Image: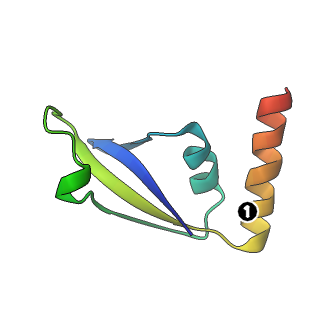
Amino acid sequence: LRLAPATCTGQTVDYKYFDDEILASSAEFLFTFDAPKSARRSDSNVKDMVTAIVLTKTGHRNAMKELTRLVKG
């Protein structure tokens, strides 16, 4: 389980950290909800969200292989 900060613009979810997008693509389940008030940016015109990324052991392993491939080239 990982809680990933993100912003939502229309139908698109943009994750704050690049590895969250890779984890989300290998996730078993994704749950997106509004960020708590303390975590929101006051000057933002976009909607601040948090995504709960639920991975299985196999999904996590696949995401780590993809991250390794991206980092090492």
Answer above or below: position of 28 versus 50: below
Q: Residue at x 77, y 33 (%)?
A: 70
Pick whichever, 22 or 72, lies toward us: 72
| For residue 17, side relative to residue 7 (left or right) | right
Give the tally of numbered discs: 1
Q: Residue at x 52, y 40 (%)?
A: 17
Pick whichever, 29 or 5, lies toward us: 5
Q: Position of residue 28 (x, y in %)?
A: 61, 70
Q: Position of residue 15 (x, y in %)?
A: 45, 42
Pick whichever, 25 or 36, lies toward us: 36
- At label 1, the amino acid type is His
Q: Quadrant of the C terminus?
A: top right
> Which residue was labeled with disc 1?
60
Residue 55 location, quadrant: bottom right
Q: Residue at x 83, y 37 (%)?
A: 69
Residue 71 location, quadrant: top right
Residue 11 location, quadrant: top left
Q: Dot 1 surroundings within 10 Å: few (below 14), some, or many (20 or more)?
A: some
Query: What SS does tag 1 mark?
Result: helix
Pick whichever, 10 or 15, lies toward us: 15
**Most extreme residue toward the top, as rendered?**
73
Q: Quadrant of the N terminus?
A: bottom right
Q: Position of residue 36 (x, y in %)?
A: 23, 60
Answer above or below: position of 66 versus 26: above
Q: Position of residue 3 (x, y in %)?
A: 47, 61
